[in-house]
Image: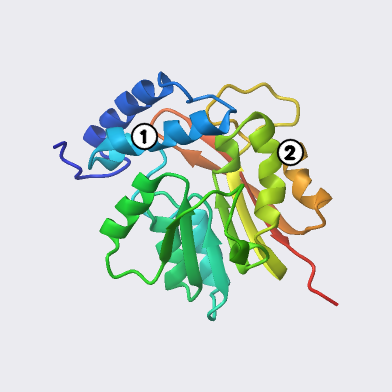
């Protein structure tokens, strides 16, 4: 078994991750907009990873700093939260630790199994789930919805449908926290992932959500500076 020690920034870990990205990009479904092929690809990511998180390109083994900063200013008091495409569970755990009653879901069963193994004493309700076909109780079921990097992993019709699918999870008065890689409106982009533009993110505005804040920031890696957008929305409360 590959030694899973270290994390992003560790040279051995980063080398394994670079090899994994090349291997995964060559698999059928890596750039597909067909739902079945995308599910197969995501499942294959976790199957091929074995026990090595370096082989899961989006696994940082820590919650995202932007989320941690936001949670420090907006703790939960038992409010219901959902973490979309939770992966190995780090963001879900941070949300739960901030006081939210948290559900973390992912399309890939391998991701959920791994998250449960990593956090066996967790209060998070880890579930296999499909954003486009959620359980009935999830519709308008959450006070805080966390979307980090999911839409940017989609293209075509799936990408267009994702905005409304995310909005449907929000209860009246709920907050949506969205972070993605960003690009200028009209800029060409290769993927995956396919960074979001402000024009695309306006789909949330068109769904009736109120934009509370937006900020740009960069993530620096060993060889790149990657622009990001963090946007916070609120769904109108019932009158």
**Residue 115's x, y, as percent?**
33, 55
Which residue does the image show at 66% across and 32% down from the upper left?
A: 183
Find the distance from the CA under tag 1 to the CA under tag 2. Answer: 27 Å
Taking the image as shown, residue 80 lies to the left or right of residue 119, namely right
Where is residue 172, by image quadrant?
bottom right
| Rendered image: mark on residue 78 | none
Quarter of the figure with the N terminus? top left
Q: Is residue 179 left or right of residue 124?
A: right
Q: In the rendered view, would you say 193 is above or below 145?
A: above
Residue 58, given in percent of the width and then of the height, sits at 42, 41
Earlier residue among tags 1 and 2:
1
Which residue has dot 2 on it? Answer: 200
| Callout 1: SS | helix
Task: Please tell me how crowded label 1 is: few (under 14), some (14-19), or many (20+) other residues with Cα within 10 Å.
Answer: many
Residue depicted at x 65% and y 60%: 169
In this picture, residue 103 sits left or right of residue 3: right
> Outermost residue, front direction?
136
Q: Position of residue 171 (x, y in %)?
A: 69, 68
Query: Where does label 1 land, which residue?
Result: 45
Q: How is the image coloured?
A: rainbow
Helix, strand or loop under label 2:
helix
* Crowding at mark 2 (Cα within 10 Å: few <14, some 14-19, many 20+): some
Residue 61 versus residue 24: which sits nearer the camera? 24
Query: Residue drawn at (34%, 69%), measured in percent from left and top?
Result: 122
Percent across and percent down for residue 65 are: 47, 55
Identify the residue shown where x is 55% and y is 36%.
153
Q: Find the residue positioned furthest to the right.
A: 239
In the depicted view, which residue is nearer to us: 4 or 224?
Answer: 4
Q: Nearer the viewer, mark 1 or mark 2?
A: 1
Q: In this orientation, which residue lies closer to the viewer: 132 or 211?
A: 132
Asked if labels 2 and 1 touch by Cβ distance under 8 angstroms, the answer is: no
Quarter of the rendering occupied by the C terminus:
bottom right
């Amino acid at each position: 078994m590959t030694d899973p020690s270290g994390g992003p920034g560790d040279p051995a870990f980063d080398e394994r991750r670079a090899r994994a990205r090349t291997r995964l990009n060559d698999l059928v479904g890596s750039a597909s907009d067909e739902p079945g092929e995308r599910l197969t690809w995501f499942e294959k990511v976790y199957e091929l990873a074995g026990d090595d998180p370096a082989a899961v390109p989006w696994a940082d083994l820590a919650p995202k700093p932007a989320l941690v900063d936001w949670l420090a200013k907006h703790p939960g008091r038992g409010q219901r939260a959902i973490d979309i495409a939770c992966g190995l569970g780090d963001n879900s755990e941070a949300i739960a630790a901030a006081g939210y009653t948290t559900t973390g879901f992912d399309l890939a069963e391998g991701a959920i199994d791994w998250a449960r193994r990593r956090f066996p004493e967790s209060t998070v309700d880890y579930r296999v789930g499909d954003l486009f076909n959620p359980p009935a109780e999830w519709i308008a079921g959450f006070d805080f919805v966390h979307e980090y990097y999911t839409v940017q992993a989609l293209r075509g019709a799936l990408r267009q449908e994702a905005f409304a699918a995310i909005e449907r999870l929000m209860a009246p008065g709920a907050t949506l926290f969205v972070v993605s890689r960003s690009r200028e409106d009209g800029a060409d982009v290769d993927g995956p992932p396919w960074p979001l533009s402000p024009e695309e993110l306006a789909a949330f505005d068109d769904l009736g959500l109120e934009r509370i804040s937006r900020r740009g920031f960069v993530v620096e890696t060993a060889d790149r500076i990657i622009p990001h957008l963090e946007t916070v929305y609120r769904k109108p409360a019932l009158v």
